[in-house]
Amino acid sequence: MSSDLLYEKRDHIAYLTLNRPERLNAISMPMLAALGQRMAEADDDTDVRVIVVTGAGRGFCSGLDLKDAAAGKGIGGEGALSQGGGAAHLSTREIPTVTMQRIDKPVICSINGAAAGYGLDLALGCDIRLMSDNAKLLPGFAKRGVVPESGGTWFLPRLVGWARACEIGFLAEDILPDRALELGLVNKVVPHAQLEAETNAWAEKIASNAPLAIKAIKRLYRHGLTEDFESHSHHVLLQVAMLFRSKDFQEGMMSFLQKRDPNFTGE
């Protein structure tokens, strides 16, 4: 697996760290492939309950590697959209923003620094975003003559509404932490020195809840975006019937009656 991506698992949490700090974690082809693969593996791992994505060094992700592209290699380089070139050979399972829309494990983005271009799309694709007060979001696609290529045009109208999405996309201005929080682009802004601890606290709290229920909630949220209310309610009832038969449901009821913390096993 690529050294451009670090993978660590502890206490039911998988940590994925973009690891090209000298390039502000600009996305390389090996990093792109490894990130999608590792996300899919974490989703398949029954011991993992939460996935955390962050960046090494002072940036989260500066986007696609423009130096590589200018040199005619890597993502965005010559032949990048042709057979056998650039990202064309990657399966959809290996494209992180696609993978994140398919997997059922919660994904927390710990935005430790600037998130630009692809890095912004990657952050928006996560389920929860925690942001350092030193970080910023850079939706400068229109200033580069391109569009958000990895989900931003899908995520933004759903996250902030049509008018705000147009404001962000058309003005292409940097978004500082307070504004990101006001727009609803991030869940919380914390002092930079506290970001790692805050991220761990959120991840550990999610991991302590019933994993089958968490997975079902995320799946139902996703389907609810494209279903009418009646159809969605039918799917919810089917999911509830399945959860009623789980050991986790029994543990949840017993721990409540016994006034103790539950110990969920994901069964």
Image (cartoon, rainbow, N blue to C red):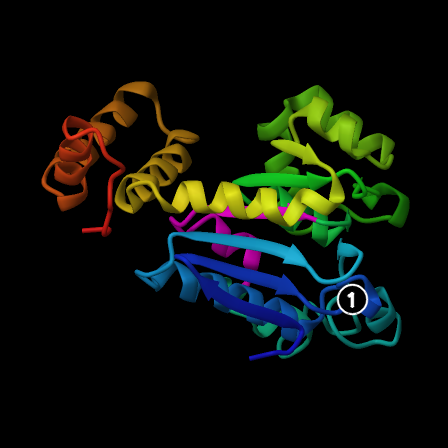
| Residue that mark 1 sits on | 21
User: Which residue is drawn at the image coordinates 16% and 37% (left, top)?
Assistant: 249
- The quadrant holding residue 66 is bottom right
Is 140 positioned to the left or the right of 17 in the image? right
Closest to the observer, 211 or 224: 211
Q: Compare residues 141 and 214 and report the one nearer the observer.
A: 214
| Residue 219 location, quadrant | top left
* Place of residue 61 in the rendered image (x, y in percent of width and height, measured from the top left): 74, 56
Q: Does 45 appear above or below 197?
A: below
- Please identify the residue farthest to the front as the structure is shown: 259
Q: Position of residue 237 (x, y in %)?
A: 18, 28
Amino acid type at mark 1: Pro
Q: Residue at x 88, y 70 (%)?
A: 70
**Label 1: element kind:** helix
- Residue 16 locus on image (x, y percent): 57, 62
Tell me which segment is drawn in magenta: 95-111
Residue 98 visible in the current orientation? yes
